[in-house]
Amino acid sequence: TQLLEQSPQFLSIQEGENLTVYCNSSSVFSSLQWYRQEPGEGPVLLVTVVTGGEVKKLKRLTFQFGDARKDSSLHITAAQPGDTGLYLCAGVPAGTYKYIFGTGTRLKVLA
Amino acid sequence: DVKVTQSSRYLVKRTGEKVFLECVQDMDHENMFWYRQDPGLGLRLIYFSYDVKMKEKGDIPEGYSVSREKKERFSLILESASTNQTSMYLCASARPASTEAFFGQGTRLTVV
């Protein structure tokens, strides 16, 4: 059972464009994490969002946690080829101990 | 520097073989996890462990078992490998209630 759905699954854009990736669930999460994974490597943490409605910025990346703590978004401004990778959201659904991951969004930024 | 190490980057095994994937972490983390990663499905949790000799089933435990005899080592066992177990396997560790999991580099297993 996949509790974290990400959209879109694939995204190919030109350098300089903006994009938004979504992570949605019917479950509540005490926090959500966003990871980026490069080919041949394990995921690496980008950010954690904890409070409903929280917005965090990491250079050109903006992360938002939904008010109800059931969803999150990642917005990239002026994407660069170095942003290419697989983006994953993750967290522990309320009432469980399982650390689960979203379905992933594979981003390719063309120069 | 924190480290999670998986014993092999690439493995090729035959159908029916018993396969062991080893994972070691040097961060003294209580929690350890095994995931498999397949295109379009993200990372799916196979098993996890929150203490030595403790294990819990994840979302897709069928065909797998695990062993945690020491805190730093978490092994994934494919009792009788099948072709549908061809995948990338990722091990991770974390502190209890942590908001970050640390990953190994992954093992790409091919079952022929």
Image (cartoon, coloured by chain):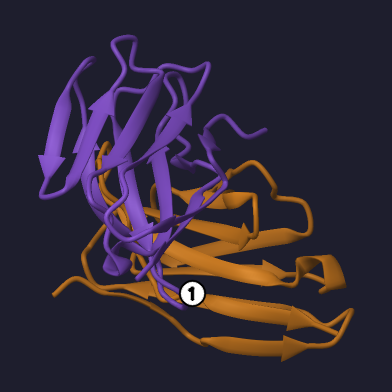
Chain colours: A purple, B orange
Residue A54 visible? The answer is yes
The quarter of the picture where the N terminus of chain B appears is bottom left
Identity, as a three-letter code, of the amino acid under mark 1: Gly
**Residue shown at 65%/60% (left/top)?**
B38
Q: Going by the image, does B105 lie left or right of B1? A: right
Residue B97 versus residue B54: which sits nearer the camera?
B97
Which residue position is annotated with label 1?
Answer: B106
The quarter of the picture where the C terminus of chain B appears is bottom right
Residue B82 visible? The answer is no
Q: In this view, does A69 lie above or below B53?
A: above
Q: Residue B16 in the image: x percent, y percent?
A: 89, 79
**Residue shown at 42%/20% (left/top)?**
A94
Q: Residue B111 in the image: x percent, y percent?
A: 80, 80
Q: Is residue A55 above or below residue B108?
A: above
- Tell me the subunit letter for badge 1: B
Q: Residue B84 in the image: x percent, y percent?
A: 83, 65
Q: Mark 1: which secondary structure?
A: loop
